[in-house]
Every structure is written in structure tokens, then in C-alpha cells.
Amino acid sequence: MKILRAYKTELDLNNIQKTACAAMLGQRAGYNWGLARKMEAYRNGEKVPSAIDLHRELNVLKKGELSWMYEVSKCAPRSTA
């Protein structure tokens, strides 16, 4: 007989911590953008962009329409993959 155990953990965050966590979770948009970009290139028969190509494109976008990405650590979007 195999016994499985599980642990439930809850965070009790204050408002500042909630805002920081929400901003970090928003960084998932970078991963989703990169995945969509790769899928689009593949469907169109184009060369699929490398990680370096995507990084360069994302940096250009971050200076414009995605400037909110600068509000959190640079490690957040890297760890979403």
C-alpha cells in the first residue's frame, strides 16, 4: 500500500507584497509572446527565431509598449520558461 502525502501552504501577503507578486506573474507575458512568435514563424514557413533573436526583439518592445516589464527584476521573465 502506497501512502501519498500533500502539504498546503498559504501566503499571507500585505498589499505591497501582493502588488509585487502580481507584477512578477505578469512577466509570463514575455514567455507567451516568445512562444507565439515562434509558432507564427513556424506556421508561415519562416526561420524560427532563436532565443537570442527573441531576446533582442523583446528588448526593443520593452522600450515601447511593454515598458511595464522594467518594474520587476530582470530574472522574472527569464525564469518563466
Image (cartoon, grey):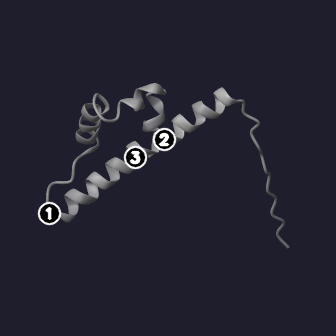
Q: Residue 26 carries which label?
A: 2
Residue 20 position (above or below residue 45): above
- Number of the front mark, 1 or 2: 2
Question: Residue 33 placed where, x, y %?
Answer: 34, 48
Which residue lies at the image location 74% right of the left edge and 39% below the top edge? 11
Most extreme residue toward the bottom is 1
Residue 2, quarter of the rendered image: bottom right
Which secondary structure lies at badge 3?
helix
Q: How far apart are marks 2 and 3 (CA)?
A: 10 Å
Q: Which of marks 3 and 1 is nearer the N terminus?
A: 3
Residue 45, quarter of the rendered image: bottom left
Question: Residue 30 placed where, x, y %?
Answer: 38, 42
Which secondary structure lies at badge 2?
helix
Q: Name the residue under label 3.
A: 31
Q: Which of marks 1 and 2 is nearer the N terminus?
A: 2
> What's the amino acid at mark 3?
Tyr
